[in-house]
Amino acid sequence: MAQRGRPRCFDRTQALQQAMEVFWARGYEGTSMAELTAAMGIASPSLYAAFGSKQQLFREATELYAQTEGSGTWATFDGHATAREAIAALLRTTAENVTAPGKPPGCFTIFAAANCAPENDEVRRDMAQRRLSVCDHVRLRLERAIAEGELPPGTNARSLTSYFMAVQQGMSIRARDGGSREELLDVARHAMAVWNGLTAPSATGT
């Protein structure tokens, strides 16, 4: 049977990559459809035919970020034998990623939909849930460290997670405000310098 309709004359994956970088730099609400079509090199009808809506395009761009730019961070995190090494790698890799040449500074997941009007609250909530999932991933690794004896039994995994995630997310803000890679690597080192104090038995109440 002959295929109906006009065939697409653009590379969908490449167009999605361009859309991701526009959302990353300008945020969901700060990005206009005109900016998207210009960056993607397609007309509005083609964008709607391929992606359905701006919101669906944003969802796909978010998934692309998670599978490409964001995936290496967590592969590095999961590849370490101890929680301390994993957290140190997370902060170090964050410093490198949020200052990567040729990419918007900061983290897509932090900036792309931090603030939204009520009609776009679903977008904001989805991104907030993704950030919470990252926190859960770190907390589970710390709980495993407690179970395996790396950390004292009374260690508060939730409190430790909140601290290190606040550092990590703050690094993204510093990058957006012009912080250099060297500065953020220093932040990572300073954060890890307090590890022993935060996880010592006296600090955990054991």
Image (tube, grey):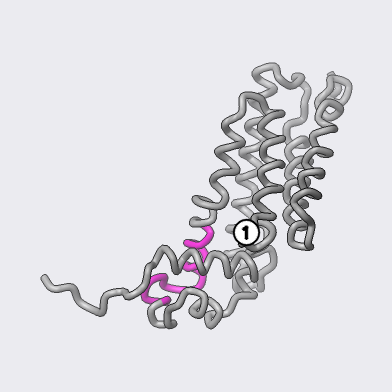
Q: Position of residue 108 (x, y in %)?
A: 62, 59
Q: Is residue 150 above or below residue 176?
A: above
Identified by mark 1, the residue type is Phe
Q: Position of residue 113 (x, y in %)?
A: 64, 64
Residues 193 and 58: in front is: 193
Q: Is residue 19 above or below residue 125?
A: below
> Which residue corresponds to the image point at 78% horizontal and 48% vertical from the top-left?
182
Quarter of the N terminus within the rendering = bottom left
The answer to whether residue 77 is left or right of residue 45 is: right
Image quadrant in which you'd find residue 198: top right
Q: Position of residue 138 (x, y in %)?
A: 65, 37
Residues 31 and 101: in front is: 101
Residue, far right = 202
> Which residue corresponds to the image point at 26% horizontal and 79% vertical from the top-left?
6
Badge 1: residue crowd in 10 Å (few <14, some 14–19, many ≥20): many
Q: Is residue 19 in the magenta section?
A: no
Q: Secondary structure at mark 1?
A: helix
Q: Which residues are magenta?
A: 47-62
Q: Which residue is mark 1?
A: 108
The answer to whether residue 19 is left or right of residue 175 is: left
> Which residue corresponds to the image point at 53% horizontal and 59% vertical from the top-left?
62
Q: Is residue 51 in the magenta section?
A: yes
The answer to whether residue 2 is left or right of residue 176 is: left
Q: Position of residue 95 (x, y in %)?
A: 71, 48
